[in-house]
Amino acid sequence: MTKVAVTGNIGSGKTEFIKFISKLGFSCISSDAIISKIYKDDRTRRIILEKLNLDDHNYKQKIIKLLQNEEFNRKLKRTIYPLLYSKKKLVARKHQSYQPVFYEIPLLYEENLFNNFNVTVFVNSNTIKRKQRVLKRGVSEDYFKLMNNKQIKENIKKNKSTFTVNNNGSILNLRLNIIKLLNKL
């Protein structure tokens, strides 16, 4: 099975990439979608929040505030990552016969996961554009800065990746760039 990792910094367009590629009929596995499902499950969310010493009320905002604390950040990763990886393995089994399979991995290089993939695609977008996209989602500028600073710089990811898809224009431009990429795969 050919495994293609799709990565990029916050607001770069990874989710749009995965949505489009999925509409084209390719098999896709999204880390963000899996984590969202994990948190939507009441029982699992309670267990996670208990391990993090948080209550259910406004837990997302509390987690975002606490992300600045490195000790909390490590604790969050130790709590969430095992769940994410086990769910991802279950989902991946369903996609074994598909070629290629696209994986959306936001922290591909930060967590040293790139060796698990045959091909890596970096969705590149300038900081101003990424910030505009994130703020449109209703997230604060402080959150954008925090997450952006936790990620490896774009030029390093671009150099490490097999391919780069630029996303500084419209969704149509992104889709055209994805189609160009597919011709290279």
Image (tube, rainbow, N blue to C red):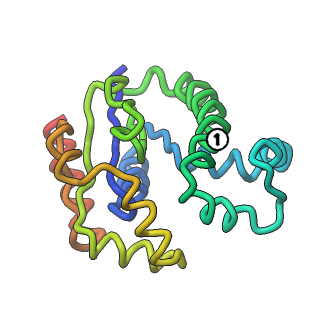
User: Which one is in front, 181 or 44?
Assistant: 44
Q: Is residue 55 left or right of residue 104?
A: right
Residue sitting at x 36%, y 52%: 151
Q: Quadrant of residue 27?
A: top left
Label 1: which secondary element: helix
- Percent across and percent down for residue 29 are 49, 39
Q: Is residue 11 left or right of residue 39?
A: left
Residue sitting at x 35%, y 54%: 17
Q: Quadrant of the N terminus?
A: top left
User: Which one is in front, 72 or 42?
Assistant: 72
Q: Relative to 68, is 48 above or below?
A: above
Residue sitting at x 44%, y 60%: 147
Q: Quadrant of the C terminus?
A: top left
User: Which one is in front, 117 or 127?
Assistant: 127
Residue sitting at x 45%, y 64%: 146
Within 10 Å of disc 1 (Cα), the crowding (few <14, some 14-19, many 20+) is few
Q: Relative to 63, is 71 above or below?
A: above
Q: Is residue 164 left or right of residue 43?
A: left
Query: Which three-letter amino acid code belongs to the residue tagged 1?
Result: Lys
Q: Which residue in the structure is indicated by mark 1?
A: 75
Q: Is residue 28 left or right of residue 109?
A: right
